Structure formats: structure tokens, C-alpha cells
């Protein structure tokens, strides 16, 4: 044992502070659920009792349309007989500004997603390796180590990794509450700003996600205007993550910050406005690693292009997408059909939950629901939420994400994703949820979480124990990681 400890100390001394840090946030409950899924993934025939992945915000509902387009346009790929003539030009070195045809096509797509109400300049598009890289790139451009961004909570758990790990930037939550459907208020913004100042932390910006992950809601026009006025008053940046822009499937419509700053009653310093976008959610192509920074600040665009050399999008990918996104008829059909399919899936999913008394925050966007399981808690504590979550993972065999991992201050909310599976798998997941909620109260052994109260006392509902795994097994046991795991790839 002493030799192992000595080896670990030596490794700690040899590596950098970043390499030795836990800033990647893999100890989050959000990632713990992934570890459980990776160890025991569901398969309808090979492993029907495995864990179903409902923690992955991935859009698989329109793959058939994209696959069909690709089959009909083999010339769009340089790796086919029809497209091989472009191989040499694309496979050789490309300017890290990106292919002009690609930037024009992305700008066109971004405009169509926003209903044609705003246009985008291809020369302001900065490429990055997914939205993860785009967020970090902006953090490097806008803030120094120790500076902070305000972020309305609940918010995407991996922002702690994306913006903080390598940059040294801090995040200050802006507390939003269920009493007003988690809307952002000026009082909460001012309170977060004041607390940062009292801690002698310089606030450099406000980061919002619209549509929201995990809420699945869109920001209304008045709220967006108030946010623009707030950042102008404080002279701080506004970073708008709009990666779910085309996932809006019902009213009210999505409103981009780019629309707001064009309105006559808004006086805005455009140098403070920046967008993050990607094709991971709207098109369901996270494996393509297409992230975009769109800034109205010339200095950020110039600096961002220099930094983008550390995370370029493959020129082969750019070439294919330039052709696909330039097909206006296809793009319009994809956006329309995606909205219809998401609406149908959301309606079926929430209706089935309601049959057993489970409600969700009213939403009209995203690839997930913000599920209210507060009635299943014996007490309103994080420990009770963790206990319920362990049972859902261990016994119900579903990977859903607890609200505390999203920095939600109200225990009992869970994000559950519904667009990353086929209809048959969703039916199995819903049957498991319904069976769990309908199960009569029975004593159950629940794994004890580190630094938590005895978990058995924290549950109102429980589930008959079949083969519970302990929390330590999820975290410590070596296992094969799924290619879909965020520990190795995609942002979720």
C-alpha cells in the first residue's frame, strides 16, 4: 500500500496542476449515471434488463432524412467515387478560418433556423471542435483566470468543465425557482452580481442557454431585452448558447438574441454580444464536432480564429456539410419534420408520465423534459434526491440526471431525455417508470452515498431489491466505456 501511495505522490509531482485537478467534473452525479450505463447498457435482446440511457441529449429522430440525402448526393463526400475528384484539394492544408462555402452554408442554416428573421455574416463565424470547444474559446477570449460568468441555474452540468477547467474562470449561479417556472428575474441577477462583487470577483459576462438545457423552455422577448439592458448597464459580455434553436416544437417561438439587438427600442453595445452554436442538437450530428462562435466583436473574431487552430473542424466534414446545408429545400424539410417528430415524442412521453401522476415543467423545446419527482421524496434534501436517483439507476435501470447536478437548488427535479432512442426502447423505459411509481411501499436496501444521511430514510417510494450495485462499484470498477460516453466524446 505504501508503495502505491508513493507512486501516486510521484505522479502528482510530475504532472501539471490541470492534469492533477478534478476540474473535468467527472465526480459529478451527472457523469456517475453515465458510468452506470456504460457498465450495463440496455439492449432489447442481448441485455434486456440493462440500464436505458436517458441522460444523453441527442437527437436521433431525423437520421433517416440525413441518411437519405447522403445516399442521393454521393458527390458531397470526397470519399466516394462520385466525389473523389475533390479529394486532393480538401485533404491538403486548409486555412483555419474554414472553407468559405462551409461558413456561408452555416450562416444560411442559422438564419433559416431563426425563421429568416435575422441574417448572419459568414466572416464572423469562428469554427471550433463542438460547442464544448466554442464555450472554452470564448472564455479564453473574454476573461482571465479568476474572473467570473453569471449563469442562471439550473444549467448544463458540463459548463463547469467547458468554461472553468483549463481557463481558471469561475461560474456564479443566478438562482431561478420553480415558483415562477424557473424564469430569470432581475432581482436574482442583481443578487448574483452583488455576491460576486462582495467576494472580490470580477464579473466579465452573463451566460444564458436559450432554449434552456435542462428546462426545455425558451426565453421571451421581454426577458431577453432585460438581459441586454443588464449587461449594457454593467458593461459585461452576454454569451448566448443557442445550440437547441431548431428543437422548438411548439409555441412560443424561439427568439434569438440576434433579433433583439436589431430592435429599435434596444440600445446595445454589440461588442458585448456573442453566440455559441453547433450542429450537435439541431441536426443530431455530435460526432461531427461542429461548433461555432459567432461574435459581433471584431477583436473576438480575430482572436477566436487564431485559437480555433487548436480545435478545427475536419475539412472533409466541412465539405460535406457545405453541400448539405446549401440545399435549401432539404434544410427547410429537415427543420419542419424535426419539429413535428419532437412534438409527437414529447406529447407521448409526458402523457405516459402523467398516467402515474408524474408531471414535468411545461416546455416546448429541447430533447428532454424537466421531470418533477418531488412528491417521491420523504424530505426536501439533496440526500433524499440522491437516494431516489440511486434507486432509479440500480433498480429501475434508467439513467436520468438529478437536478442537483444541474445546480438546481430545489431537490427532486430530474432531467430525462426522450429523443435519443427508438420508440420501442422508449416504451420499455416508460413501462419501467410506471411500474416503479405504482409499486407499493416496500423496504429496500439503497446504496449509501458518500457523506449522505442513511438513504433508506430519505425515500417515500422504494423498489424491491433484486441486484443492487453499490455506488463505489460504478466509480471505481474498470469497465468498457461506451463510444457515446461524454467521458470520451460528445457534449450532452
Image (cartoon, rainbow, N blue to C red):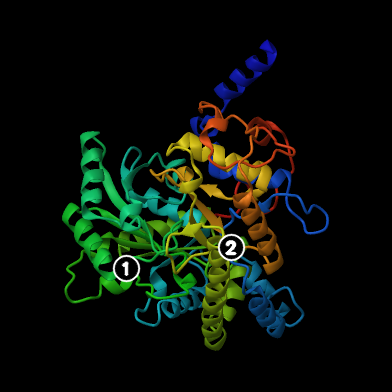
Q: Is residue 433 above or below residue 412?
A: below
Report the side of 299 relative to 311 (left or right): left
Q: Is residue 458 above or below residue 254?
A: above
Q: Residue furthest front?
A: 440
> Which x, y percent locates residue 331?
54, 82
Which sits in the foreground, 86 or 433?
433
Q: Residues within 10 Å of mark 2 (few under 14, many from 20)?
A: many
Q: CA–CA distance between discs 1 and 2?
A: 27 Å
- Residue located beneath label 2 in the image: 418
Q: Earlier in the sequence, mark 1 or mark 2?
A: 1
Q: Residue 256's quadrant in the figure?
A: bottom left
Instruction: Say what secondary structure mark 2 lies in.
Output: loop
Q: Residues within 10 Å of mark 1 (few under 14, many from 20)?
A: many
State the residue at coordinates (25%, 49%).
188
Instruction: Say what secondary structure mark 1 lies in.
Output: helix
> Which x, y percent locates residue 43?
77, 56
State the residue at coordinates (72%, 35%).
478
Report the side of 299 relative to 109 (left or right): left
Q: Is residue 365 above or below residue 156?
A: below
State the residue at coordinates (44%, 56%).
306
Q: Which mark is residue 257?
A: 1
> Which x, y percent locates residue 428?
70, 60
Q: Residue 267's quadrant in the figure?
A: bottom left
**Residue 26 seen in render:** no
Which sits in the foreground, 382 or 339?
382
Specify the quadrant that holds the C terminus. Answer: bottom right
Q: Is residue 76 above or below residue 370?
A: below
State the residue at coordinates (54%, 79%).
340
Which sits in the foreground, 288 or 10?
288
> Which x, y percent locates residue 205?
29, 51
Amino acid at each position: 500500500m505504501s508503495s502505491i501511495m508513493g507512486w501516486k505522490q510521484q505522479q502528482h509531482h510530475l504532472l501539471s496542476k490541470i492534469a492533477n485537478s478534478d476540474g473535468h467534473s467527472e465526480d459529478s452525479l451527472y457523469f456517475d449515471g453515465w458510468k452506470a450505463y456504460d457498465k450495463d447498457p440496455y439492449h432489447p435482446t442481448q441485455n434486456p434488463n440493462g440500464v436505458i440511457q436517458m441522460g444523453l441529449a441527442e437527437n436521433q429522430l431525423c437520421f433517416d432524412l440525413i441518411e437519405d440525402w447522403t445516399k442521393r448526393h454521393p458527390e458531397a463526400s470526397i470519399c466516394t467515387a462520385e466525389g473523389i475528384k475533390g479529394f486532393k484539394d480538401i485533404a491538403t492544408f486548409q486555412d483555419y478560418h474554414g472553407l468559405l462555402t462551409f461558413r456561408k452554408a452555416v450562416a444560411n442554416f442559422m438564419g433559416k433556423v431563426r425563421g429568416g428573421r435575422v441574417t448572419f455574416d459568414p466572416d464572423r463565424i469562428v469554427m471550433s471542435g463542438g460547442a464544448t470547444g466554442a464555450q472554452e474559446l470564448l472564455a479564453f477570449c473574454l476573461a482571465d483566470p479568476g474572473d467570473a460568468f453569471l449563469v442562471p441555474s439550473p444549467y448544463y452540468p458540463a459548463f463547469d468543465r467547458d468554461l472553468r477547467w483549463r481557463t481558471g474562470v469561475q461560474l456564479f449561479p443566478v438562482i431561478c425557482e420553480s415558483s415562477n417556472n424557473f424564469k430569470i428575474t432581475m432581482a436574482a441577477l442583481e443578487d448574483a452580481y452583488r455576491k460576486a462583487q462582495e467576494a472580490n470577483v470580477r464579473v466579465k459576462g452573463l451566460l444564458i442557454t436559450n432554449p434552456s438545457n435542462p428546462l426545455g423552455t425558451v426565453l421571451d422577448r421581454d426577458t431577453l431585452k432585460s438581459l441586454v439592458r443588464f449587461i449594457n448597464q454593467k458593461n459585461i459580455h452576454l454569451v448566448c448558447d443557442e445550440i437547441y434553436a431548431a428543437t422548438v416544437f411548439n409555441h412560443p417561438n424561439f427568439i434569438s438574441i440576434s433579433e433583439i439587438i436589431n430592435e429599435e427600442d434596444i440600445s446595445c453595445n454589440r461588442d458585448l454580444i456573442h453566440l455559441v452554436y453547433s450542429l450537435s442538437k439541431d441536426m443530431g450530428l455530435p460526432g461531427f464536432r461542429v461548433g461555432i462562435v459567432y461574435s459581433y466583436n471584431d477583436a473576438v473574431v480575430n482572436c477566436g480564429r487564431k485559437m480555433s487552430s487548436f480545435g478545427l473542424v475536419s475539412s472533409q466534414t466541412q465539405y460535406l456539410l457545405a453541400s448539405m446545408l446549401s440545399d435549401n429545400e432539404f434544410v427547410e424539410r429537415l427543420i419542419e419534420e424535426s419539429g413535428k417528430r419532437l412534438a409527437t415524442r414529447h406529447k407521448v412521453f409526458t402523457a405516459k408520465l402523467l398516467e402515474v401522476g408524474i408531471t414535468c415543467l411545461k416546455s416546448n423545446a429541447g430533447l428532454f423534459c424537466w421531470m418533477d419527482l418531488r412528491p417521491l421524496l420523504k424530505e426536501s434534501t439533496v440526500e433524499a434526491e440522491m437516494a431516489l436517483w440511486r434507486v432509479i439507476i440500480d433498480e429501475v435501470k434508467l439513467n436520468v440526471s438529478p437536478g442537483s447536478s444541474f445546480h438546481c437548488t430545489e431537490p427532486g427535479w430530474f432531467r430525462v431525455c426522450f429523443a435519443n432512442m427508438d420508440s420501442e426502447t422508449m416504451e420499455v423505459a416508460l413501462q419501467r417508470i410506471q411500474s416503479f411509481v405504482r409499486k407499493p411501499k416496500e423496504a429496500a436496501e439503497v446504496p449509501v452515498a458518500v457523506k449522505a444521511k442513511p438513504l433508506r430514510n430519505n425515500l417515500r417510494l422504494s423498489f424491491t431489491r433484486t441486484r443492487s450495485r453499490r455506488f463505489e462499484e460504478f466509480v471505481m470498477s474498470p469497465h468498457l466505456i461506451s463510444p457515446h460516453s461524454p467521458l470520451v466524446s460528445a457534449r450532452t
